Image: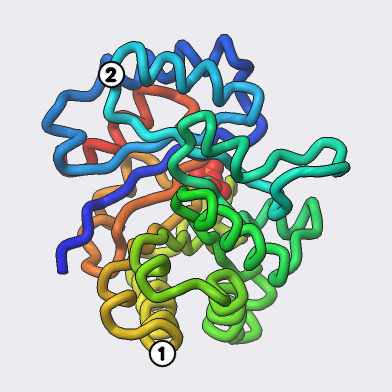
Amino acid sequence: MTRKPLIAGNWKMNATHLEAIQMVQKLSYRLDPDDYERVDVAVFPAFTALRSAQTVIETDHLAISLGAQDVDWRAQGAFTGAVSAPMLAALGVRFVIVGHSERRAVFGDTEAEVGKKTRAVVEGGMTPIVAVGESLEQRDAGHTTSVITSQLRAGVKGLESDAVARSVIAYEPVWAIGTGRTADPDTASEAIAALRDEIASSHGDGAAAAVRILYGGSVNPGNIAAFMAKRQIDGALVGGASLDPDQFAAVIRYWI
Ligand code: 13P
């Protein structure tokens, strides 16, 4: 089973729609057709910039996928401020991150809500990126595997095996996000192997062999190659380094 690497740039709450247009254009100038053959590339602007990014991608026929950083699990109704999966799908969004640690910690997203979001994304015809990760206290207490497998179980609950096979999981240890402190590639690889085992037990060996599992947390051009050298690691979810097109292009072209 060969899994095509995915390098995803989570811009978080950065970039206006005007800045987003420039960022997508600059990124595209730095990539060649061969790069897209080797790696799937996706950017995750804020909701307000999705339409502008979509327009650039479609007008310039770019092989860059559009992603959203979050979604509400309800389809429509009196939920002020919320954005639904059908709204994202209508903008050409292909990937949606659910369960990012910032959503869990800052906005209080629960494991059960993350599961509902995942199902809404799949029902909307898009691909969820289910993010999981332990805090430093949980790691120090030796609870990493139980924490991340529990988050994953809840995150993919109720999905059919073929939907899980097409999904993406992101292992992002909370202590490595935005800190400049990465998990070492062996540690990340072990955690990802545990997540793959969990999928094998819940959804079968086929889904486990097919599902792409990314590493995230302080990925940059200097450390990406060491992560990508690991058989278990199928790509990266990149925060800070994805805001600079030069750096993000260098992460995408990790073999150079
Ligand atoms: P950094 O790459 O800035 O550490 O962020 C990682 C992340 O949270 C991506 O979703």
In percent of width and height, residue 207 lies at 32, 75
Q: Which amino acid is tagged 1?
A: Ser
In percent of width and height, residue 92 lies at 46, 32
254 lies above or below 182: above
In percent of width and height, residue 66 lies at 44, 33
Identity of the residue drawn at 46% across and 56% down: 182
- The tag earlier along the polypeptide, 2 or 1, is 2
> For residue 201, which numbered disc appears in the image?
1
What is the quadrant of residue 168 in the picture? bottom left
Tell me the quarter of the image containing the C terminus: top left
Ligand 1: does it lie within 8 Å of the C-beta at label 2?
Answer: no
Identity of the residue drawn at 67% across and 43% down: 84
Q: Which residue is mark 2?
A: 61
SS for callout 2: loop
Q: Which amino acid is tagged 2?
A: His
Q: CA distance from mark 2 to mark 1?
A: 40 Å
SS for callout 1: helix
In percent of width and height, residue 129 lies at 48, 55
Q: Residue furthest left?
A: 34
* Residue 192 shown left or right of residue 218 in the figure: left
> For residue 27, which numbered disc appears in the image?
none
Tell me the quarter of the image containing the N terminus: bottom left
What is the quadrant of residue 208 in the picture? bottom left
Q: Nearer the viewer, residue 97 or 222?
A: 97
The structure's colour scheme is: rainbow
59 lies above or below 96: above
Mark 2 nearby-residue class (10 Å; few <14, some 14–19, many ≥20): few
